[in-house]
Image (cartoon, rainbow, N blue to C red):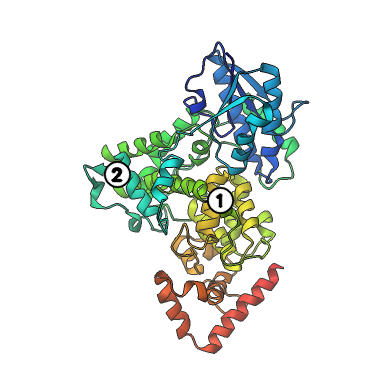
């Protein structure tokens, strides 16, 4: 009996559910590089290179262990360019009794998967993806009957269920969440550990040449590629973070600084999202550092919350709410995304800094994404489809199951509050407090009116003014609306005029 085991490019885990009962003498592992996946948005070249290089290293490991692998490269002459087309060709080549796959991370791929059995005339077994700590069924059970979905409630349930950062039945340190301690701006003179990365070997160099040839016009620089592309490298990166970054991660996880793209962040999300690391092993490594006294609780809890809480939560939201979720647009936003999101050419230093960093590194941390590029898109009323496509394209760790809820729900509040209790709208004061970007900007962050005023300030009040019918009743926003109402009519008009004048420049 021959079993064809189809492994996708973000499933690079030897313990993957579709491989658990692999019989090397009888089974064949199919892996394919296809144009459809490389081009459905114009992915950052470093993202494409990361996935292809990691796939090829994963295959080499399988073959070294005697596993039969059928591997189709992007530049193979007969490559059909799609998962379905390549699976159909492989079925003809091998004549398997059945195909075994692990459920994918994206809705569109799962729809194709469900049609394979009928289309190809062979049994297709789709197994649950057990790399996550909360299965899709478990999340649906948690969500059943709830009118609102709040990450904090889910996170506490996951802590109780797993025993992670628990002292008996109580949370470690007596608190569930230490976020209030994790909002410090970066002090002068404090140096971050930096990220040297991993020099490309011959396998990766071959991929880099292919990507440079085929995707030269995509947004992003390919030079300086240094992501981990093997499990060994990913584990090394995790070790380096725990040793050099974790202790200060909590305090400065929201900080931003010119010329400091990484600060104390782990940079493991690309490796985690393609399967080179598992969330549980990452969490246990960080918890052990706290238990051993190598990291403070606010750092360990803040990091673990991002994975055990937020990462698991957004995946649950994605599968619970799709496919209609992607079509929601609570604020009826329809403004085209400004061209400088692709060029980085803007006088707003915060946006120029983050977009420039994104171009170079295919990376920005969560506050840069949420409160700089994301907040600006929210305030101007950018079309959610364009914004979602941009985030999916430009970041190496972006896959729709994690990107869409983060962007659509948390950044844009386009889901009307399903994911977050309020929009993350803010003026330039937040960016000034958490970064040094404003010191290098031609606009004045202390001003709201006039041509030299920080655009974020007037846009913030315009956003609140335009959407008061939806937001005024939100208890978390009542105070700020009272502030707006205290402005005299002349000042409100001046602020709104500044916002509209600036928006005209975006056209």
Vertical placement of residue 13 versus 186, above or below: above
Question: Toward which corner of the image does residue 294 lie, by quadrant?
Answer: top left
Badge 1 element: helix
| Residue 168 x, y percent position in the rendering | 21, 42
Task: Determine the residue positioned at 66% across, 41% down.
Answer: 45
Q: Residues within 10 Å of mark 1 (few under 14, many from 20)?
A: many
Which residue corresponds to mark 1? 404
**Residue under label 2:** 160
Residues 264 and 465: in front is 465
Image quarter where the N terminus lies is: top right
Picture quadrant of residue 166: top left
Q: Does residue 183 appear in this view?
A: yes
Q: How many marks?
A: 2
Residue 374 pos. (x, y %) = 55, 59
Instruction: Give the x, y percent position of residue 91.
Output: 67, 22
Q: Report the residue that reaches farthest toward the left.
A: 168
Mark number, residue 176: none
Residue at (59%, 38%) from the top-left corner? 110
Residue at figure coordinates x 51%, y 63% from the top left:
416
> Considering depth in this image, is 179 or 176 the residue closer to the camera?
176
Q: Is residue 446 at all visible to an observer of this figure? A: no
Q: Of marks 1 and 2, which one's residue comes earlier in the chain?
A: 2
Vertical side of 453 occupied by 15: above or below:
above
Q: Position of residue 185 (x, y in %)?
A: 41, 59
Q: Quadrant of the C terminus?
A: bottom right
Q: Quadrant of residue 46?
A: top right
Q: Residue at x 68, y 48 (%)?
A: 219
118 lies left or right of 256: right
């Amino acid at each position: 009996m021959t079993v064809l085991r189809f492994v996708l490019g973000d499933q690079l885990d030897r313990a993957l559910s579709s491989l658990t009962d692999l019989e090397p003498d009888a089974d064949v592992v199919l892996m394919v590089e296809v144009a459809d996946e490389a081009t459905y948005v114009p992915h950052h070249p470093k993202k494409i290179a990361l996935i292809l290089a990691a796939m090829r290293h994963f295959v080499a490991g399988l073959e070294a262990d005697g596993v039969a692998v059928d591997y189709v490269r992007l530049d193979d002459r007969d490559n059909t360019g799609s998962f379905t087309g390549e699976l159909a060709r492989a079925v003809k080549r091998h004549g398997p009794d059945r195909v075994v796959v692990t459920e994918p991370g994206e809705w569109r791929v799962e729809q194709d998967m469900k049609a394979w059995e009928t289309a190809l005339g062979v049994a297709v077994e789709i197994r649950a993806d057990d790399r996550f700590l909360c299965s899709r069924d478990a999340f649906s059970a948690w969500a059943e009957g709830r009118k609102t979905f709040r990450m904090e409630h889910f996170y506490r349930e996951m802590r109780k269920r797993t025993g992670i950062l628990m002292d008996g039945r109580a949370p470690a340190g007596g608190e569930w969440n230490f976020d209030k301690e994790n909002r410090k701006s970066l002090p002068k003179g404090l140096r971050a550990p930096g990220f040297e990365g991993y020099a490309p070997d011959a396998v990766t160099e071959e991929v880099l040449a292919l990507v440079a040839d085929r995707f030269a016009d995509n947004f992003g620089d390919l030079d300086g590629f240094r992501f981990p592309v093997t499990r060994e490298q990913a584990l090394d990166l995790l070790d380096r973070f725990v040793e050099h970054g974790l202790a200060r991660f909590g305090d400065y996880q929201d900080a931003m600084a010119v010329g400091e793209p990484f600060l104390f962040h782990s940079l493991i999300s690309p490796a985690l999202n393609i399967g080179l690391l598992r969330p549980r092993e990452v969490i246990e490594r960080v918890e052990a550092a706290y238990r051993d006294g190598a990291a403070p609780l606010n750092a360990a809890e803040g990091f673990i919350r991002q994975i055990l809480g937020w990462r698991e939560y957004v995946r649950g939201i994605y599968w619970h709410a799709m496919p209609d979720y992607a079509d929601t647009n609570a604020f009826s936003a329809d403004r085209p995304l400004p061209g400088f999101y692709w060029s980085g050419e803007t006088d707003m230093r915060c946006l120029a800094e983050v977009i420039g960093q994104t171009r170079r590194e295919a990376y920005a941390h969560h506050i840069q994404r949420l409160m700089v590029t994301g907040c600006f898109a929210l305030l101007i009323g950018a079309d959610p489809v364009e914004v979602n496509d941009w985030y999916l394209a430009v970041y190496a760790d972006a896959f729709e199951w994690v990107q869409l809820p983060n962007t659509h729900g948390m950044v844009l509040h386009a889901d009307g509050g399903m994911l977050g209790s309020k929009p993350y709208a803010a003026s330039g004061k937040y960016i000034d407090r958490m970064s040094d970007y404003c010191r290098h900007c031609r606009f004045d962050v202390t001003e709201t009116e006039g041509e030299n005023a920080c655009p974020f300030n007037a846009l913030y009040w315009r956003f609140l003014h335009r959407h008061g019918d939806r937001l005024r009743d939100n208890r978390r926003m009542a105070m700020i609306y009272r502030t707006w109402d205290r402005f005299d009519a002349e000042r409100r008009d001046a602020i709104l005029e500044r916002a509209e004048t600036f928006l005209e420049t975006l056209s």
